[in-house]
Amino acid sequence: MLDLLDLPHRSAKPRQQGVTHVLDKGLSTAEVDGLIEVVGGVIDIVKLGWGTALATANLQAKLERYRAHDIPVVLGGTLTELAIAQDRLERLIDWIHQLGLQYFEISDGTITLERARKLELIERLSQDFTVLSEVGSKDDTGAITPPYRWVEQMREELQAGAWKVIAEGREAGTAGIFRPTGEVREGLIDEIVHDIDRGRIMFDAPQKHQQVWFVKRFGPEVNLGNIAAADVLSLETLRLGLRSDTMAPGERG
């Protein structure tokens, strides 16, 4: 029934733009089934947050559900950081291969990872996986990375082979590209997209007002990440202008 109204264009899966990256913080298989029933067609990637893949009792069953509906899964970047810190990265890579996953996230928001080492890992991993590399710190104390460093790091990581770079915002939306209050650092975003193709960026946007800001600023085909499972349908209606927040001004009552 989408042809009932004149709605914004949404590219079809598998998407390169307008990607919705969903955070699974511990869904049951029944919840996964319900999620897919309602919004499976608009979910592009699911991330099993942090190290939940090691702690959940339903990993294989969950992966089978997502695989059956052609929804790729990636493990959280925190797990990669922990593996690097414990010199267990090779074991993690082997395990991800065994799980049959095609995506790999690498980040350094918590650990200190030499720049050259991160770029070397992106280049290497991109030979076997679709790599998502995260830029920005998880620090929510208000420490600010200068915009030129964001641009420099994003450019380097894309050149190294990352499919998209994730602009860090944390699950709470209170760090990185956001102020501790959750407010978007608009000047930072403007400077980033002045030099980096926004289509190559996945903007973390867990809070509704952040999603509204990005959709209004960049349109329905903006790539948004760390979306809560319960918010996927809400986000899609924002993309399509089916909520007052993103409805065209002339269409409001």
Image (spheres, rainbow, N blue to C red):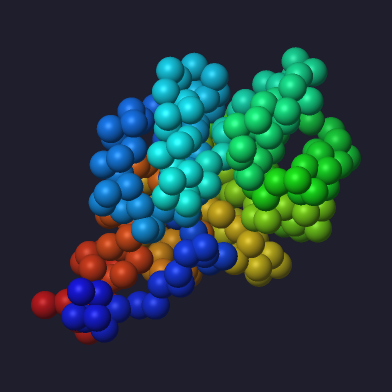
Residue drawn 74% across the image and 22% down it: 91
Q: Could you say where residue 215 lies in the image, as x and y percent from the top left?
A: 40, 65
Between 123 and 148, the residue placed more toward the observer is 123
What percent of the width, then of the height, locates residue 154? 72, 54
Task: Note whether 116 is above or below 250 in the view shown.
Answer: above
Q: Which part of the image, by quadrant, shows the N terminus?
A: bottom left
Q: Nearer the viewer, residue 138 or 131?
A: 131
Please name the residue shown 34% across and 31% down the image: 29
Q: Describe residue 227's horizontal placement relative to residue 249 as left or right.
A: right
Q: Is residue 99 left or right of residue 42?
A: right
Task: Name the spot of residue 90 as percent of width and height, x first.
Answer: 78, 25
Which residue occupies 47% across, 64% down?
A: 13
Report whether 207 appears left or right of 97. left
Q: Work out whether 169 lies above or below 223.
A: above
Please tell me which residue lies in front, 223 or 34. 34
Residue 174 seen in the figure = no
How far across and how far down the image is residue 189, in percent?
A: 57, 59
Q: Which image quadrant: the C terminus?
A: bottom left
Can residue 10 be seen in the rendering of this structure? yes
Q: How many marks?
A: 0
